[in-house]
Amino acid sequence: METKKTSLYQLHQDCNAKFVEFAGYQMPIQYSEGIVEEHKFTRNHSGIFDVSHMGQLFIYGGDELIKDLEKIFPLDLKNLKLNHSKYSFLMDKDAGIQDDLIITKIDEGFLIILNAACKDNDFKILKELLKEKYKMVLDENRSLIAIQGPKSSQILNEDVDGVKDLNFMSGNWFLFDNQKVYITRSGYTGEDGFEISIPNNFAEKLTRELINKGSKLAGLGARDTLRLEAGLCLYGHDLDKDKTPVEANLKWAISKERISKGDFIGSDIIIKQLNDGVTKIRVGIKPEGRIIAREKTRIFNQSDVHIGEITSGTFGPSVNGPVAMGYVENEFSKKNTKVFLEVRGKKYAANICSLPFYKKSYVKGVNQ
Amino acid sequence: MSEVKYSKEHEWIKLESGVATIGITKHATEMLGDIVFAELPEKGSNVEKDGTAGVVESTKAASDVYTPVSGEVVDINQEIVDDPSKINQDPENSAWFFKLKIKDKSEMDSLMNKDDYDKFAKENNT
């Protein structure tokens, strides 16, 4: 299959991007300044990320759709206000995570942002589960641009008046160049920021406007170091079909009201795990020295017994040290538990720590 | 006069009165991206030609550092361990990795000169 290009491909090239193939797309991993600079610029100013490879699934319907989606997602969707977003997951009957996603209530139904590598399969699954009762569009005609960092609000508001008044995890339709764009105050970097769903033909124009106002493009490399410092999971690494939301330490994202009823896919396992506990759980891991423990690094306890594995690990530019996440046996998941990481045949000391590694600065309730 | 030679693994080596200074090339640092971790051989240890003598890690991946000649490690550059970003800044000069008392000068013969290496690096841009 030929690799796809996003509508910003030419702009990426003009900005000297290094490309990688990611989920069937040619995506920029970094630009000329490099991952560390792009990361720091995002934290201190604002970075622009092309995330157009992600799926934008529009499902159209009313009250019946809400009921049907509640059979799938562990969310209190009937009380989700218009233009508000929730983080959730698509699970199988064993509560294995098939994808993690953001779902937003829009006028005509819902907008769901899906991972690039999962979106086609998600679409198939959802279509079957919803028995083709609703119009569903996995929109390839729209790009998705994220602007992240403390200056994002000021910069984006110059082009799209009113975005600065959005609350975190909420959105609305706005106009840019007479085009309808849907903007949410959200992101995946641990910074304040926005995600902009925009018709393909206008994505480059908007991005160039943002660059002219002082923002800079940042690649998937910086996106990965930013999200890991923020303690956020990456599907296919920290989350997959062999892990449940409870094991992934994401039970905060499951509606308590829905657990009491237990009528969604995977609810039996979720309820059982919430009551009985789990054998393995996702934790933050901080190596003591500078050693970087990457995905699949084995974790040992103080008696040299294998107790888990790293699922993401890198160097955190803002933390100025290595950071990692992984799954360990539950009894070793307490904060400050000393563990050992096997890197290139040697064992290095590390400590279980709370997440995030880097404190979030999301804007909450600017209107309140 | 000292001569600088280059290996296919993107190390440079400069020989001065029986002691070789070894580091990684600018081309290597450009391929690796931001280097955030460096591990060097132990002082006093012996390393064999084409064997692993260290590791560098960028934000993206880990990469072994090989020694282009055999010898005894007589010095290491602690500064690049303490601040690995120095490797990106000045890879072919102040950010050298280690120094060897070399065993066999003829091991240098199979290495490339600057022109050949530049050509090689251009053709192997991965």
Image (tube, rainbow, N blue to C red):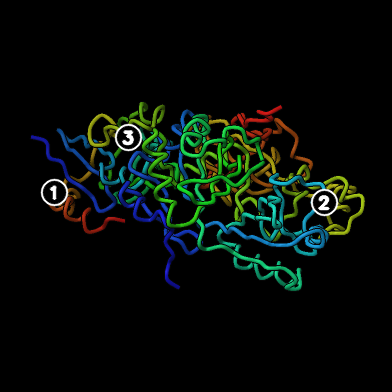
Chain letter for mark 2: A
Looking at the rendered structure, whether the residues under marks 3 and 1 are on a common chain is answered as yes
- Which residue appears farthest toward the left when viewing the image? B1
Chain for numbered disc 3: B
Q: Secondary structure at mark 2?
A: helix
Name the residue nearer the viewer: A214 or A322: A214
Mark seen at residue A168: none
Work out how far the residue at label 3 is from the one at label 2, CA to CA, in angstroms.
Answer: 56 Å
Tag 2 and tag 1, C-beta contact below 8 Å: no
Q: Residue at x 70, y 70 (%)?
A: A127
**The residue tagged with tag 3: helix, strand or loop?**
helix
Q: Which residue is mark 1?
A: B113
Q: Circle 2 is placed at which residue position?
A: A78
Q: Secondary structure at mark 1?
A: loop
Percent of width and height locating residue A17: 35, 49
Residue A168 appears at what percent x and percent y? Answer: 65, 36
Note whether A38 is above or below A118 in the view shown. Answer: above
Q: Amino acid at mark 2?
A: Lys
Dot 1: within a 10 Å radius of its alpha carbon, few (fewer than 14), some, or many (20 or more) residues?
some
| Residue denoted by label 3 | B87
Occupied quadrant, residue B17: top left
Query: In the image, what residue occupies the spot 76% across and 45% down?
Result: A81
How far is disc 2 from disc 1 in space, using C-alphas?
Answer: 71 Å
Q: Is residue A158 above or below residue A98?
A: above
**Which residue: 42% across, 57% down?**
A201
